[in-house]
């Protein structure tokens, strides 16, 4: 039996939601009747196809805004677009991310700058812009998609780990600031999900470690997850739906692991 999380008619922004985890979370919220503003890069025709399909198969209004997550002015306009289109913003999911794998002494400087901008700085800019709208509405849910790599480190991912650790710290700090404002701020820390980003990592890790892609999956990626299974989109969606519902009202300032016991070891 389908569960009603009581969020129909709410409005959500999900950054990086044209593929992967963000797209999966958008589908879960839209299925609950949440109006969604999608964001991300990709083929414009495919993005429009996916937007229209999601709108036609749910009771939600689905919009798209192409803000570049490295540009603060465009991020601010993305948040204001929620006000212009729906008159409210109830849920912000900071999910945008990229990856590059290399030893730190060989890491391209421009890749460091991009990782920090898209993962960490965009989380700040979007949250900063969203808080006044949420305060005006008397309720808000901010969910930052961090990572197991926001809690533990791996080699060849220094910038990614730095950014994700930063997201977790940012989450905790902002949760304290908003504790009396009926706005919760949490981080979900997934293990490996078989997204296009992770599929790209498999290739990069194979090159960095001198291994075959199959060996990387078995020994490196699923090697750290005691369940030996990829995390599914539905598992992350379940956590998100709890956090944005009234059931999650007392969960704030948390970094919640969904990682097949990776960080339990």
Image (tube, rainbow, N blue to C red):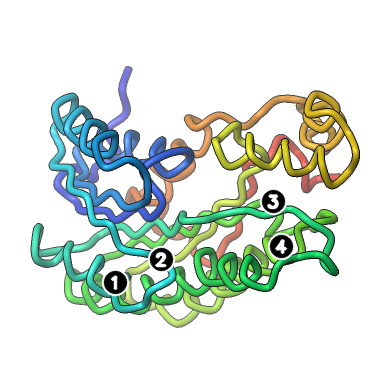
- Helix, strand or loop at label 4? It is helix
Contact, CB < 8 Å: mark 3 with mark 1?
A: no
Task: Identify the residue at horizontal 64%, vertical 48% (top origin).
Answer: 257
> Quick one: label 3 or label 2, which is nearer the N terminus?
2
Q: Nearer the viewer, mark 3 or mark 4?
A: 4
Label 4 close to label 2 by CB (< 8 Å):
no
Looking at the image, is mark 3 or mark 1 earlier in the sequence?
A: 1
- Between the residue at mark 3 and the residue at mark 2, the CA separation in whole angstroms equals 22 Å
Q: Could you tell which of marks 1 and 4 lies nearer the N-terminus?
A: 1
Q: Are marks 1 and 2 in contact (CB under 8 Å)?
A: yes
The answer to whether residue 143 is left or right of residue 64 is: right
Q: Which mark is residue 74?
A: 1
**Residue 203 vs residue 71: left or right?**
right
Q: Read off the residue under disc 4.
A: 161
Residue at horizontal 62%, vertical 32%?
Answer: 231
- Across and down, in percent, residue 37 comes to 24, 51
Residue 184, placed above or below residue 30 = below
Secondary-structure class at tag 1:
helix
Counting from the top left corner in percent of width and height, residue 109 is at 68, 73
- Residue 238 vs 82, above or below: the answer is above
Cα–Cα gap, marks 4 and 2: 18 Å
Residue placed farthest to the top in the image?
1
Q: Which residue is mark 2?
A: 69
Determine the CA span between mark 3 and mark 1.
29 Å
User: Left or right of 34: which side holds 264?
Assistant: right
Residue pushed farthest bottom?
A: 177
Residue lying at 84% horizontally and 47% vertically, measured from the top left = 208
């Amino acid at each position: 039996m389908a569960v009603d999380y009581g969020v129909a008619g709410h409005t959500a922004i999900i950054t990086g939601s044209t593929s992967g985890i963000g797209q999966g979370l958008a589908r879960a919220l839209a299925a609950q009747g949440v109006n969604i503003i999608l964001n991300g890069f990709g083929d414009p025709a495919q993005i429009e196809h996916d937007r229209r399909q999601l709108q036609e198969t749910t009771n939600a209004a689905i919009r798209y805004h192409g803000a570049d997550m490295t540009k603060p002015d465009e991020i601010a306009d993305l948040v204001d677009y929620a006000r212009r289109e729906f008159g409210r913003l109830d849920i912000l999911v900071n999910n945008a991310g990229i990856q590059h794998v290399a030893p730190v002494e060989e890491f391209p400087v421009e890749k460091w700058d991009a990782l920090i901008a898209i993962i960490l700085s965009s989380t700040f800019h979007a949250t900063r812009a969203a808080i006044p709208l949420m305060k005006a509405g008397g309720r808000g849910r901010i969910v930052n998609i961090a990572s197991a790599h926001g809690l533990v480190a791996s080699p060849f991912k220094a910038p990614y780990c730095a950014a994700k650790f930063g997201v977790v710290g940012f989450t905790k700090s902002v949760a304290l600031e908003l504790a009396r404002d009926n706005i919760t701020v949490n981080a979900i820390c997934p293990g490996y999900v078989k997204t296009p980003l992770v599929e790209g990592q498999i290739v990069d890790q194979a090159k960095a470690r001198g291994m075959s892609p199959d060996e990387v999956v078995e020994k490196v990626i699923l090697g750290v997850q005691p369940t030996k299974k990829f995390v599914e989109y539905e598992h992350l969606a379940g956590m998100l739906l709890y956090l944005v519902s009234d059931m999650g009202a007392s969960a704030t300032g948390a970094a919640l692991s969904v990682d097949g016991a990776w960080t339990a070891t």
